[in-house]
Amino acid sequence: MDINFSAEDLAFRDEVRDFFAREFDAELAQQLSATQGGDYKSAIVSWQKKLHAKGWIAPGWPKEYGGTGWTVTQKFIYETERGAAGIPDVVPFGLKMVAPVIYTFGTEEQKAHFLPRILSSDDWWCQGYSEPGAGSDLAALSTTAEYAGDNYIVNGRKIWTTFAQYADWIFCLVRTSKEMRKQQGISFLLIDMETPGVTVKPIVSIDGKHSLNEVHFEDVLVPRENLIGEQDKGWTYAKALLAHERTGMAEVADSKRMLSKLKQRAAEEVNGGTAMINDPVFQMRLSDIEMELMALEYTELRVFASMAGGGMPGPESSLLKIKGTEITQAIQELQLQLAAEYGGALQGDLSNQELGHDYAAEARSKYMYGRAATIYGGSNEVQRNVIAKAVLGL
């Protein structure tokens, strides 16, 4: 692997830096620092529309559908600069999850209708996979869709549905047959959230924020043309979507920024007359994380290179998900340890700022929510089983 940038790559890096510095202003950054409230949705949509106007909204899409046509190196540069600038990634549910399913398995009519609206951020999507009795064992889902005339009638509920309170559409796995093996009786439906019978109930997570929801369906009518692919074949499309989701969970660029901030804070935090950055135990933990993150970065590049021709991610996406989430949690844990007793502070506790520990509440919040990282998107235990079966043949 050649890790040296060409003159063209360096020029592209400068263009990315200039665009971020010019378009991502302080007001937008402040609005995006929250993960709830109307300001967040308007801010993220505003930012994504800027990316769309620039032609940079969908680096992973095939160029024929509106992708950038970037090389693997250009994608790497873009992600690295985005992370370094502290700019959040795009909301993945439309652009990185359902869109690849639509342009791979959808009809021409579905592509023509949905893809432009996803690109422009005119439609906000959420994911209807997990249920109260079907999380890591997703094939155990029980939400039903009965075919009647030109519609499906959907009944059931989904849980842990991120940003459903903002969503215009939800992509759902539903059971359309109980007569076959559970993975074979599932279909993939696109449902308008404004349809009568759809109800969203908030779930406040342990960090005190509202990003999660429970979505109820009561006799919801969904047109037949909103079915992706064939009826009862949804498990195939679901696995393809999950592979795309897990590939994005490595979050290398964001972890690099988190690690950089951790080093800066450790240099400022003094314990027993010595900066924590010089503490041997802290140094050892920091070095272990940094080495694993570097290894993950190169692995991610190899995976992206293998997909350069437009291929689908394989079981290696499970590896990226496992290591990426474990590294994220390790950084969050070290951040909380650095905050020490101040890590018990609640968000907005001004006494922490007065004492010079303004990062403590943030560290606590990220640590608490981050415990879910090794569970959502398919638990890491399940990912190890995927690798054992698909790669090792066990």
Image: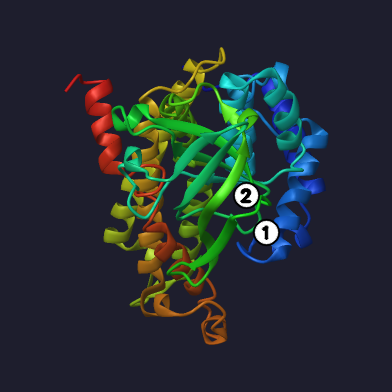
Q: What kind of element bears circle 1?
A: helix
x and y percentages locating residue 255 in the rendered image: 48, 47
Task: Give, as a three-letter code, the residue at label 1.
Answer: Leu
Dot label at residue 32: 1
- Upstream in sequence: badge 1 or badge 2: 1
Q: Residues within 10 Å of mark 1 (few under 14, many from 20)?
A: some
Distance between mark 1 and mark 2 Cα atoms: 8 Å
Dot label at residue 105: none
Residue shown at 21% from the left, 21% from the top? 392
Would you say residue 324 is visible in this rendering?
yes
* In this picture, residue 51 sits left or right of residue 264: right
Residue shown at 65% from the left, 54% from the top? 196
Would you say residue 277 is visible in this rendering?
no
x and y percentages locating residue 294 in the rendered image: 41, 36
- Residue 78 is drawn in which quadrant? top right
Q: Are marks 1 and 2 in contact (CB under 8 Å)?
A: yes
Disc 2: which residue = 88
> Is residue 160 placed above or below 356 in the rendered structure?
above
| Residue found at the very far left of the displayed protein | 394
x and y percentages locating residue 55 in the rendered image: 78, 30
> Is residue 39 placed above or below 306 in the rendered structure?
below
Residue shown at 68% from the left, 52% from the top? 194
Q: Nearer the viewer, residue 125 or 274?
A: 125
How many labels were placed on the picture?
2
* In this picture, residue 164 sits left or right of residue 159: right
